[in-house]
Image: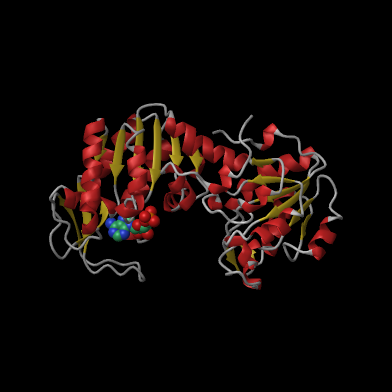
Amino acid sequence: MATQTINDVNLAGKRVLVRCDFNVPLKDGAVSDDSRIVAALPTIKHLVEQGAKVILCSHLGRPKGQKNADFSLSPVAEALASKLGQTVTFIEDCVGPEVEAELAQLGEGEIALLENVRFYAGEESNDPEFAASLAKLADAFVNDAFGTAHRAHASTAGVADHLSPCVCGFLIEKELAYLGEKTAKPERPFTVILGGAKVSDKIKVIDALLEKADTIIIGGAMAYTFALAEGRAVGESLSEPDHISTAKAALEKAKAKGVKFLLPADNLGVKDLDFGAGTVGDSRYFEGNIEDGWEGVDIGPKSIELFKAEVAAAKTVLWNGPMGIFEIDACNKGTFAIAETIAASDGISIIGGGDSVKAIKMSGHSDKVTFMSTGGGASLEFLEGKELPGVSALDPKQ
Ligand code: AMP
């Protein structure tokens, strides 16, 4: 069911609790990557222009229910204020009488940012009392934190029991549109590229996308479990022999549904990989079997050409997961070739979160893709077809 958005309601004059995803990396006490702050700006600006009293909240890191200055959101308040050119009042706690007293001073069109909600254990346990204390600060609720929408926490779901209206912000609206509608009724051909470490982590996504895609391309270590399912040898490559049957079932489903299912035609094999040092020893390409003593770490040049041609022919491309151990320079060619090809495609390009977003950004082409998801786990769960508690807690469209 479609969810109401901030465009469906008028929040002028209301105290609005906005759940943002300000889980940003910090370095020397300052925000070192402000992408998540930038992503939250459209919703915040809209509420300010409408004359709402904007009360922002978020988690940052894993303080495990304890107050811990290392995880304070105070640097986010500074970064946000400089992006908006407007004062952002930082409140040094997120619940209680002192917070209520400070927020009583907040005028229409003004912004406050609460301290890290995960300083309280009740946040992650979705404690009803903690949710009620947080909700007491506001009249209405806007959830714009897609990255935590797959968790039923107090600030993502619990508060919605006490506030009205409860709607999503522009960021979640966009995530639902691209990961949801654009993949449910895609412009065809619809090509999906999945990579990463484990088939077991992504099998539900593969299964759900087999219902929608015209072509599914598998890269990364995941491909080696599929190779085992096809009776090939994978040497010392990362694979999941326990999931050969899972891979076989996916291959059979693809055949039954007429979905083109592509595995790498060749792989880069290396010896003596040292992840910590970022180095590899001998390296060579393998077509078919990977010999004993060699570890598959990337797709090879033939696979790159094959996958490029599929992407170029697609009208919609969805990518999740690297093609190899892209953290090591010697193993990153496949991942970056895919990133560049997707960025250069004329079709709709959707990057499904996590490492693929990192790779697109590192390739310098992130401005050329249609949509990059801000959620890792949340995008995978949504692509699996699961209901996200932080979305289902909101008001449905009338
Ligand atoms: P995931 O979280 O499942 O998307 O997996 C991402 C991780 O998969 C990255 O850290 C990659 O280094 C890793 N990965 C991708 N390809 C391989 C491979 N061939 N061997 C080992 N790890 C890989």
Quadrant placement of the N terminus = top right
Query: Which residue is pictured at 14% across the width and 55% down the height?
Result: 233
Q: Position of residue 181 (x, y in %)?
A: 48, 32
Q: Residue at x 77, y 43 (%)?
A: 48
Ligand 1 is found in the corner quadrant, namely: bottom left
Residue 195 x, y percent position in the rendering:
33, 49
Quadrant including the C terminus: top right
Q: Residue at x 33, y 43 (%)?
A: 206
Residue 78, horizontal then vertical, whole percent: 72, 59
Residue appearing at x 62%, y 42% in the figure: 394
Left or right position of 263 against 2? left
Image spot of residue 152 (x, y percent): 56, 53
Question: Nearest the camera: 25 or 286?
Answer: 25
Q: Nearer the viewer, residue 159 or 110?
A: 159
Q: Foreground residue, 81 or 164? A: 164
- Asked which colour scheme the image uses, the reply is secondary structure
Left/right placement of residue 10 relative to residue 255 reads right
